[in-house]
Structure formats: structure tokens, C-alpha cells
Image (cartoon, rainbow, N blue to C red):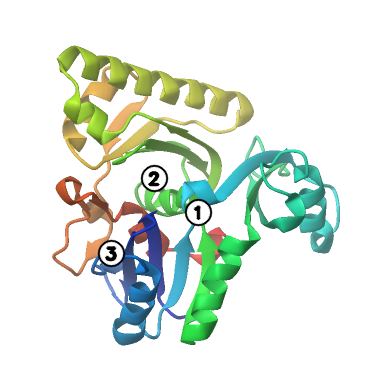
Amino acid sequence: MSDAPWLGIYSIHNERLVAACAVPGSGPRPAVRVAPVFDGADPATLALQWQRAQARRAQANVLLNSVDYRIVPLDAPRVPPEERRAAVRWQLKDLLDFPAEQACVDCLDVPGPTPGAESRQVFAVASQERTVRGWMQRYRDARLALGAIDIPELAMRNLSVLAAGPAAHAFVHLGLKSTRLTLAWQRELCAFRQFDVAAYKLDAADAATRARLLERMALEVQRSTDSFARQFHGADLATVWVSAVRDADEITRQLSDLLPQSVQAFRVEDHVALSSSQPVVDPERGLDFTFAIGAAIRRDEMH
């Protein structure tokens, strides 16, 4: 199934899934079709029914919700590749809020401090086994292809490198419920943060409170980029890309006054050819397809 298109699926909450499917295209931008919204007591079943009817050839890339996994930075274990997961699981045993032996564990390599340098660190991604096995069982029962189970941070990386390529950069997504920040270099995830400045808080704020919230966001971004510069001294992080479910241009302008880097607005439709009329974000309906689209443009060489 390596040549099959990806169907990105993301759970906004227990009763709502959003999805997007890559479609063949010959243009410079990846082409994606946004799926209908899957609402109800069992949205996963609705998503699989849609996949069977509309995207049967696709392989699903399911993004875990943030409550279902942990990312832990660790020193890269110096063991043979076949022993790596076991070594990481042992390192995680006192760092998780659930038993490590009940976790599904994977590793993401973090680039070395300079180009070509050996990786000194990994991100261990641990999720509860029942969550992962639940998705695997659904797909086995449906006789459909489940190609990957991923995390939103990688979906963000997939999108941000469309704009930045291999250059070091930060990517901020101001979402409906929180703000996520990823920092990437050489097309690899290098750092990440999540904080509670959300679109609804900005919408409800008066001018002074809004300014304070954006100042706080800028401070978090600046701290993260400063830490990145200390760890990856061979990289030059010159650009912060800003994606927002509302007022992206205005938020970009305000952050550009607060940050030393070049701050640019990121619009999914500028980098992805969308073949459906559904908007990428619809704040009034509580919809944000950004992560699902990022999952749909997954490239195996970046994982």
C-alpha cells in the first residue's frame, strides 16, 4: 500500500472526527479533498463507512488526540536498532502516568546540533495500548487499510515544511482550544510546545486582554526559539510561520511586532490544492481541518 493515498483522520473530541484525503495531482502543491464531518456517538464507524464508499484505496493515517499520548525527550539509546524500542520503554517506566508495559512506544530521531552530526536525542511517543489496538481492530473488522497512527505535531511538521523546506523554522497554530508550536529543521521535528492561548479566548477578550494574551504567546515562542538556538547551534531559525483559525493576518502582524524573527502568515490553501468547497476552518461550527490535512500529506521519507 506504499503508493496508496493517505486519508488523514483527527478526533476533535469523542463525538466528532474530521478527515482529509490526498488525491492524485500533477501540480506543484499536494492535492487534498476534505471529507464531511463525522458527528455522533460513534464517529469512527461513520469515518470508516465514508472511507469504504469514497476512498477505498486510501490508507488511513489516524492522529491521536493529545490526551491519548505522551512525547518524552530522551537521550538516544546506544543499542542496536532492533533493541531500540525495548530500551526506550525501559527509560520511560518512571516517566508516564500509565504503566510502560501497557504502552505502544515509537521513537522519532531528533537532528544533531549541526548538519550531519549524530543524533543525540529522540522523542519517545507513548500511547496507551488499548487506544492504538482499538483503531487497529476497527480497521481489521472493516477490511480497510490503516497505514499509520501518528500525532498532531508530525501533521504540523508535514505542513510547515511545505513553506519552509529544510530550513529551520517555527510553526504556530492558534487553534480552537489551544495553541501548538513546533520547531523543525532538516524537515525533522526538533521541539514542540502547547499552551492555553486559544482562539475563543482572543475572541472574548477586550483589546487590553487580547494584547496581553498575544504578548504571552510571543514570550512562549521566543523562549522556545532561544532554547532551539542553544541546542541546534548549526541552524539559523529566521522565520516563524503563523496559522490561525481566525484573524491570521492580524495575529501575524501583532506577533511580528513582538518577535525578532520574520513572522509570516501560513494559509493551508496557499500550499495545498484543495479540491472541495469545505473551508479549512469554520470557527462557528467548531471545525478545524488543519491537522487532518497535515496527516493526509504524510511522506514516508519524513517518518
In this rendering, position of residue 120 left or right of residue 164: right
Disc 3 and disc 1 in contact, CB within 8 angstroms:
no
Picture residue at 23% right of the left edge, 42% below the top? 245
Q: Which residue is mark 2?
A: 164
**N-term mark: 3 or 2:** 3
Picture residue at 63% right of the left edge, 28% below the top? 231
Residue 49 position in % (x across, y down): 34, 81
Q: Residue 54 or 2: which is nearer the viewer? A: 54
Numbered circles on residues, count = 3
Q: Nearer the viewer, mark 2 or mark 1?
A: 1
Q: Is residue 220 positioned above or below 270 on the image?
A: above
Residue 269 position in % (x across, y down): 22, 55
Mark sitting on residue 39: 3
Residue at the far top: name it: 208
Q: Work out which quarter of the rendered image holds the C terminus and state it.
A: bottom right
Q: Residue 75 or 112: which is nearer the viewer? A: 75
Q: Which residue is mark 1?
A: 151
Disc 3 and disc 2 in contact, CB within 8 angstroms:
no
